[in-house]
Structures are given as C-alpha cells and as structure tokens.
Image: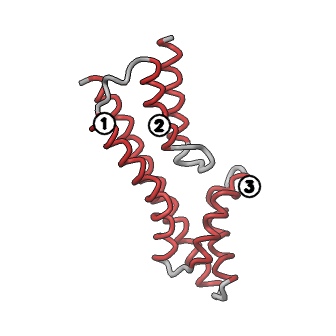
Amino acid sequence: MDILGWSLVVILFILGMAGTIYPILPGVVAIYGAFFVYGFFFSFSEFGWFFWIIQTLILVILFIADYAVSAWGVKRFGGSKASIVGTTIGLIFGPFIIPAFGLIIGPFAGAVIGEMISGKNFEHSLKVGWGSLVGLFTSVIVKVILQLVMIVLFVLWLVF
C-alpha cells in the first residue's frame, strides 16, 4: 500500500505541474489533492493547522493570480474586456483546435479578435495579442514557482 500511496502522490504532483502549461488539467488542485492522498494512505498527523493554512493560502493565491496575471498582461498593453474574454476563450479552446501550438495561438488570436470586435484597429489588436502572451507566460512562471513551493513545503514538512 505504501507504493500505491506514494505513486498516487507523485502522479498528482506531476499532473499538477503539467497543469501549469496545459490549462485543462487540474494543476494546483492536483497538488493540493496529493496532500490528502498522503494523509489517507499514511497519516495526517504530520500536518498541523499551520501547514494547511499555508497550503490553502498558496492555492487561493494561485487561483486569483491565474486570472489576474493574464488579465494584467492584456490590460497593460491596452486591451479591453472583450480581449480578456477572447484570451480566456482562446486559452481554453486553443489547445483542442490546434493541439501543438493552440496554447500560444489561442490566447493571442482570442485577444486580437476581441479587440477587433470592440472596434480597435488591427495594429492595436496585435499589440494586445502580444500582451496576452506576456500575461500567459508570466502566469505560467508564477504558477510553476508557487506550485514548486507547495511541493517543497510538503517534503520539508515530512522530513522535519
């Protein structure tokens, strides 16, 4: 049972880190779930209330940052609400429509189309599309760092 428990924890950590790049995967929720899997297979006794507060705080920050950082990138480059909506739609559907490059093309195209629909010129729309990519890559970096912090804290909590 130990091997199964640790295997599930590791699989959830890998799934969580993959979710930083592929938005349809549960990401941070998988990492958070790994803590419960560990608790069910082994013990919750290693985790006190402070552990859960820190991990839950990081989880909430990641949920907020995921949307806020992407929107920040679009807004910083002069985008409207239409381009934020377009970016989100492109981020969700892009990887399915164009599997290899949809994660990049989807948000970019969504932002450009959103700006064009809101009446902006093509040059401005391209600038906002670029902003959507800046926001996307910044969001990925923030997610990778914070999710690694969650995993490292988990390991440190078990070791010390």
Question: Disc 1 or 3, which lies upstream in sequence?
Answer: 1
Quote the CA–CA distance across marks 1 and 3. Answer: 40 Å
Tell me the mark number nearer the camera, choosing from 1 and 3: 1
Tell me the mark number nearer the camera, choosing from 3 and 2: 2
Secondary structure type for disc 1:
helix
Label 3, residues with CA under 10 Å away: few <14, some 14-19, many ≥20: few
Q: Amino acid at mark 3?
A: Ile
Q: Amino acid at mark 1?
A: Phe
Question: Disc 3 or 2, which lies upstream in sequence?
Answer: 2
Query: What percent of the width, then of the height, locates residue 40?
Result: 46, 22
Query: What percent of the width, then of the height, locates residue 147?
Result: 42, 43
Q: In the displayed structure, does residue 82 sit left or right of residue 74? A: right
Quote the CA–CA distance across marks 3 and 2. Answer: 27 Å
Report the front residue among 99 and 115: 115
Quote the CA–CA distance across marks 2 and 1. Answer: 14 Å
Report the front residue among 133 and 63: 63
| Residue at (41% x, 17% y) in the render | 42
Report the disc number at residue 78: none
Label 1, residues with CA under 10 Å away: few <14, some 14-19, many ≥20: some
Tell me the mark number nearer the camera, choosing from 2 and 1: 1
Query: Furthest residue to the top?
Result: 1
Report the disc number at residue 98: 3
Q: Which residue is mark 1?
A: 51
Query: What percent of the width, then of the height, locates residue 63?
Result: 47, 54
Q: Are marks 2 and 1 in contact (CB under 8 Å)?
A: no
Q: Which residue is mark 2?
A: 31
